[in-house]
Image (cartoon, rainbow, N blue to C red):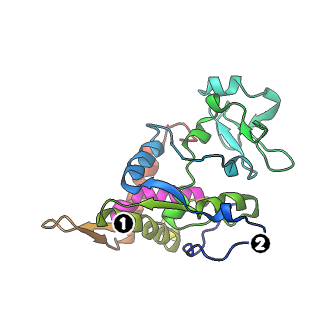
Amino acid sequence: MADECSPPFQELGGREPGVQEADVRNLAAGDFSAWMTEVQQAIRGERFSDVPCGGCTACCTSSQFIHSAPDETDTLAHIPAAMLFPAPRLPLGHVLVGYDQDGHCPMLIDNACSIYAHRPRTCRTYDCRVFPVARVELDDADKAAIARQTRRWQFSFDSPNARVQHDAVSAAAAHLVQHRQLLADDAVPANTTQLAVLAIEVHDAFVERDPETGMTKITVPASDAVRVMVTSRRRSQRGRTPGH
């Protein structure tokens, strides 16, 4: 089932029942401008994500199917064949790893990835910081640990323009939800992750720069302009390996 997006995150305040104080303490997400450059490169398949996870295994224990492409021969050599099954709606050779009765990745042993150096590309490019930046939240009960973790990220900003860029991503996400009926069927985000990633890719359309001062502000582009950007993105991705 596709994830639904919800209103922006609330400020950290009250604690959820059963959540320890250490679980709600803020986490340093890094410099926002540097992260945006890195995450856009990861989205384009030019690099892997570098997430300061620490000991967090939320994404490994949240009932997620992990995709591997045929070219990931090293990864596939380190996962027992019995744990792999064909990925629906993808070409032959694309496979998924499921999860156990507790929702844990079967390669997670003693609370650590047993194939970390050989982990799938999907794991290498996953970055849960996209959710708070886009101000969308995972409301699937199975993803509660990820949702809880994402609320803890706190970015630093080196300039007012960086804060505008941050707000532009959330503005893009809200626009995509509000005007999703204008997008082609194959361009509509199928889940919260796709929505957050797409918002990062098209956020530039929501930033206006003053040519004299160089300062930026949020703008509201025409819906057709956003649709054209989304369509262009979809065309550029055709032929790329799924999972990037």
Q: Which residues are magenta?
A: 193-205
Q: Residues within 10 Å of mark 2 (few under 14, many from 20)?
A: few
In the displayed structure, would residue 103 be above or below residue 23? above
Give the secondary structure at mark 1: helix
Q: Is residue 218 left or right of residue 227?
A: left
Give the secondary structure at mark 2: loop
Place of residue 64 in the rendered image (x, y in percent of width and height, measured from the top left): 72, 49
* Three-letter amino acid code at the position of disc 2: Pro
Choose between 31 and 101: the one closer to the eye. 31
In the displayed orientation, state which residue is furthest to the left.
212
| Point 59% across, 60% down: residue | 150
Q: Is residue 72 left or right of residue 156?
A: right
Place of residue 117 in the rendered image (x, y in percent of width and height, measured from the top left): 62, 29
Quadrant of residue 153 in the image? bottom right
Q: Is residue 125 left or right of residue 106?
A: left
Quarter containing the N terminus = bottom right
Q: Disc number at residue 163?
A: 1
Q: Any magenta on residue 202?
A: yes
Quadrant of residue 230 in the image? bottom left
| Point 54% across, 36% down: residue | 241
Question: What's the magenta bit mostly, secondary-structure-wise?
Answer: helix
Choose between 9 and 40: the one closer to the eye. 9
Q: Dot 2 corresponds to which residue?
A: 17
- Residue 3 visible in image: no
Quadrant of residue 86 in the image? top right
In the displayed structure, would residue 135 be above or below residue 129? below
